């Protein structure tokens, strides 16, 4: 999937004019890409649209207009665009109570080493995209991951997309001692990911 380029970004005034429509479209797309990962986390599979929205919203929120600062945002967020044969996923710890969340983040130190994409016959460990480094005594509330897909899974997803076979069983799993969860990816999510892999 092609990274976001500078020429695709709108200036603040131009973005404001189309923001409501663009956000509504991407938010609807995100609903198909988001899955619950147990009671305390969710995962969002990223693509160019979700990353473009993140960049535009960051520029808007922070009122970023300097070219060097814009380039920095593009470079940072482009790491979340999946490459060839990859899936890109943001996992968010979602605990409303601050004290409970802080305790969980301490208990779940090393969380980023315990996230997997699972199929019928294999587990694929998530590869962490380091945004700001790792913490030793706790984990963070947001993690950015990529999964390198084996050829057989790529083939199965492409075949299902073209109607040549059933959708493969694919899920996400966390096996941290402080938090264990597993969820199957629904067909509509798999269809989105298969479209990503074909682009």
Image (spheres, grey):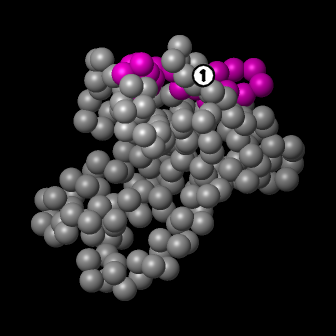
Q: Which structural element holds mark 1?
A: strand
Q: Quadrant of residue 4?
A: bottom left
Location of residue 140 in the rendering, given as x and y in whole percent from the top left corner: 36, 32
**Count of marks overlaid on the render:** 1
The stretch drawn in magenta includes residue 109: yes
- Residue at image point 41% right, 33% down: 101
What residue sits 45% from the left and 79% below the top? 20
Above or below for 92 versus 118: below
Looking at the image, which residue is at 68% across and 50% down? 189
Based on the displayed image, in which of its 4 quarters is residue 180 positioned? top right
Q: In this image, 111 relative to 189: left or right? A: left
Where does the magenta region start and end? 105-123
Whether the magenta-drawn stretch holds residue 121 is answered as: yes
Whether residue 38 is visible, yes or no, is yes
Query: Label 1: which residue?
Result: 180
Q: Please report the residue visible at 39 percent of the width from the left and 25 percent of the height from the top.
A: 103
Instruction: Indicate the position of residue 19 as horizontal and vertical percent values.
Output: 41, 77
Given residues 68 and 136, the one toward you in this image is 136
Residue situated in front as seen by the camera: 192 or 62: 62
């Amino acid at each position: 999937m092609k990274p976001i380029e500078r020429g695709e970004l709108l200036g603040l005034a131009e973005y404001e004019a189309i923001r409501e429509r663009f956000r509504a479209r991407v938010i609807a797309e995100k609903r198909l890409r988001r899955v619950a990962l147990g009671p305390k986390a969710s995962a969002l599979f990223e693509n160019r649209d979700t990353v473009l929205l993140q960049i535009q919203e960051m520029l808007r929120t922070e009122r970023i207009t300097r070219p060097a600062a814009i380039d920095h945002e593009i470079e940072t967020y482009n790491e979340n665009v999946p490459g060839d044969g990859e899936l890109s996923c943001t996992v968010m710890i979602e605990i409303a109570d601050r004290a409970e969340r802080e305790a969980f983040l301490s208990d779940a130190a090393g969380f980023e080493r315990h996230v997997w994409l699972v199929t019928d016959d294999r587990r694929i460990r998530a590869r962490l995209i380091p945004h700001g480094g790792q913490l030793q005594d706790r984990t963070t509330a947001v993690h950015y991951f990529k999964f390198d897909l084996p050829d057989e899974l790529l083939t199965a997803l492409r075949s299902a997309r073209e109607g040549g076979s059933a959708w493969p069983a694919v899920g996400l799993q966390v096996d941290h001692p402080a938090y264990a969860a597993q969820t199957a990816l629904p067909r509509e999510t798999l269809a989105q990911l298969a479209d990503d892999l074909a682009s």
